[in-house]
Image (spheres, grey):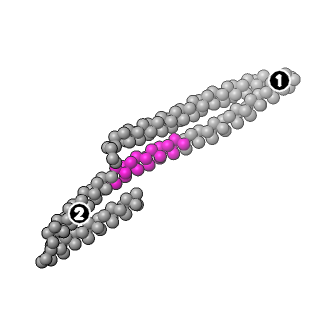
Amino acid sequence: MSDIDELQGRIAAALDRIGQGIDLRGRAAAADPEELETLRRDLEDERIANEQLKERIKVLKSRREALETELTTVQEAARTVAQLDSELQGLREANEKLRDINTRLREANAAGVAEPDLINTAMLAELDGVRAARVADRAEAGAVYDALAAAIAGIETDQGTVDEQPEGS
């Protein structure tokens, strides 16, 4: 973008110099009418080119803003997925520990050392953990789906923008 701004500034400065040159030539008593007309045409051509560049700059800035918005959306989705992954990892570890404890409790019960109520409580806790893992898995799948849908929508928008460009741009 800075290159475009720089070019626009250079073109504006050139237009000013051309305009000053035309003013000086116009004041000169022995000005060549053909050369003066050529300079006027050149000045008009430069003005047209400058306006075209300004329009292209507007289009490029608009595209950049759209891409920045899309990037922000994708980054937010990525953070959400990373957070979900972290939570799921912790949940999976807790469930694994719970299963381990339940296995030991069942073994202790088989040896006649444990209380049946303790085993039932542990089993209920394990079921709750499994249900929570299922809910977390669904949430993770939903987050991945949302991120993919946003990315696909962005691609389709970009393709529409490219398709709408006039030829020669």
Q: Give the class, few, some or many, for how many residues have Cα within 10 Å of label 2's Cα (few <14, many ≥20).
A: some
Closer-to-camera residue (169/33): 33
- The residue that appears at 79% across and 27% down in the rendered structure is 103
Residue 122: give x, y in percent of width and height. 73, 27
Q: Quadrant of residue 115?
A: top right
- The residue that appears at 57% across and 30% down in the rendered structure is 138
Residue at which label 2 appears: 42
Closer-to-camera residue (44/51): 44
> Compared to 110, does 163 lie above or below?
below
**Magenta segment, prevailing SS (helix, strand or loop):** helix
Q: Amino acid at mark 2?
A: Asp
Residue at which label 1 appears: 109
Range of residues picked out in magenta: 57-78
Discs 2/1, front: 2
Residue pushed farthest right?
111
Residue 161: give x, y in percent of width and height. 37, 41
